Each structure stands twice: as C-alpha cells, then as structure tokens.
Amino acid sequence: MDIILKYFPDLTERQRMQFAALYDLYTDWNAKINVISRKDIGNLYEHHVLHSLGIAQVIRFRPGTRVMDLGTGGGFPGIPLAILFPDSRFHLVDSIGKKVRVATEVAQAIGLENTTFAHERVEDEKGKFDFVVSRAVMPLADIVKVARKNISTDAPRNSLPNGFICLKGGELEREIGSFKHKSDTWELKDYFEEEYFQTKKVVYVAP
C-alpha cells in the first residue's frame, strides 16, 4: 500500500481505505479462484495496482468519462482506476465468468459505486465509451478491431481524444507499426522508479 501513496499522496481517506482493502480481498479470492499468479500475489500493489494506475500518469479522466476495461480478469486496470477516478464510470468486461465474479465481489466489498460488470465477449458489447483500456490482453490490432465500435464519437472531454489506452510491455515497434501516425507511447520508467516498470509502457491509439 505504501507504494501507492508514494506516487499518489493526495488520496482521500475513502480512497486510502479502498486501496488498503485490496490485499486481503485478492489474497482471499485468489485462494479460491486463481486470477493472479500465486507467486505474484505478494506483489499485488506494485505489479497490479500501481501498474494499472500507470494510465493515470498520462491522463486524468474528467468527471463523467465512460471507460470500458476490455479483458479485465480480476479487475485490472478497471478497479484501481475506478477508485482513483470516482466521478468517472467504468464497465469491466471479461469472457471468463469466474474472473468477472472476483472483480464484482471486490468492487462491492470496497463500496465502488462507479463500476458495472459484464460476463461476455467484447464482440457482444454494445455500449459506447470515451476510452477502452486494457492490460496485456491481446495485440493492439486485435483490440482496435473488436472494440472500435465501442468508442464514442461524442466530442472529447479529456486531454486525449476518445480512443484506446493499453498497458503493454517489451518491444512494441512491430505491434504499433500500423498505428504509427495515430498513436502515442509513454515509458512507465519515467514515472515509476521500481525495476518492474523498466519495460512497461502506456500506449494510446486513436480509433
């Protein structure tokens, strides 16, 4: 939890309590339904929560922003972002029911009121959103292909135009290639000093 306060020191008391509750909740649920590697649960805050909040280092969602988390798994990056941006709306989607259940139960346990959940393939999601976010779910080209229909054409309300914001790792030149002229990339090592973030990136792609 300290690592969250290191980079986000201005959290409200409610946000601090919500972030603090995540460790016991995910440890308990993970023993029943494996949504995080058992070897990695001890790194929950650095590898999962803070990594999710890397998106907040490149954009601060304005009130009323609608965000879909594609392939949320156990709730990443959707739940940490929903805690940080209580005035935005987050819709967490995954095709694996038991993972959606974990995310739903965690959100309910910490009193998140700005999240909805869907057990479905993203191809079947009809909603419109300002942004689709994801965390290492599938190649960028596939994300854009299946979820372009979900990007709202309403006037942008944020510092970035409506589009896709993805957490990625490693070498991305080939993956970004076809989006070169309508994408931006940020290195998380420029924001977080921990070794884990040396190869981690945030990628924005316009639809």
Image (cartoon, grey):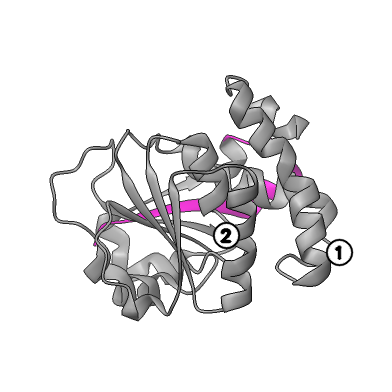
Q: Quadrant of residue 125?
A: bottom left
- The number of callouts visible is 2
**Image point 78% across, 67% down: which residue?**
37
Does label 1 or label 2 sit earlier along the sequence?
1
Tell me which segment is drawn in magenta. 191-207
Residue 19 placement, left or right of 152: right
Residue 164 placement, left or right of 84: left
Amino acid type for the residue under numbered disc 1: Lys
Residue 202 x, y percent position in the rendering = 48, 51
2 above or below 12?
A: below
* Observer able to see residue 165: yes
Q: Quadrant of residue 145?
A: bottom left
Q: CA distance from mark 1 to mark 2?
A: 23 Å
Q: Secondary structure at mark 2?
A: helix
Q: Nearer the viewer, residue 94 or 172?
A: 94
Q: Does the magenta-highlighted stretch encompass residue 104?
A: no
Residue 164 placement, left or right of 117: left
**Image point 57% across, 77% down: which residue?**
97
Residue 23 x, y percent position in the rendering = 77, 47
For residue 39, the mark is: 1
Reading the image, the residue beneath label 2 is 104
Q: Nearer the viewer, residue 77 or 14?
A: 14
Residue 54 x, y percent position in the rendering = 54, 43
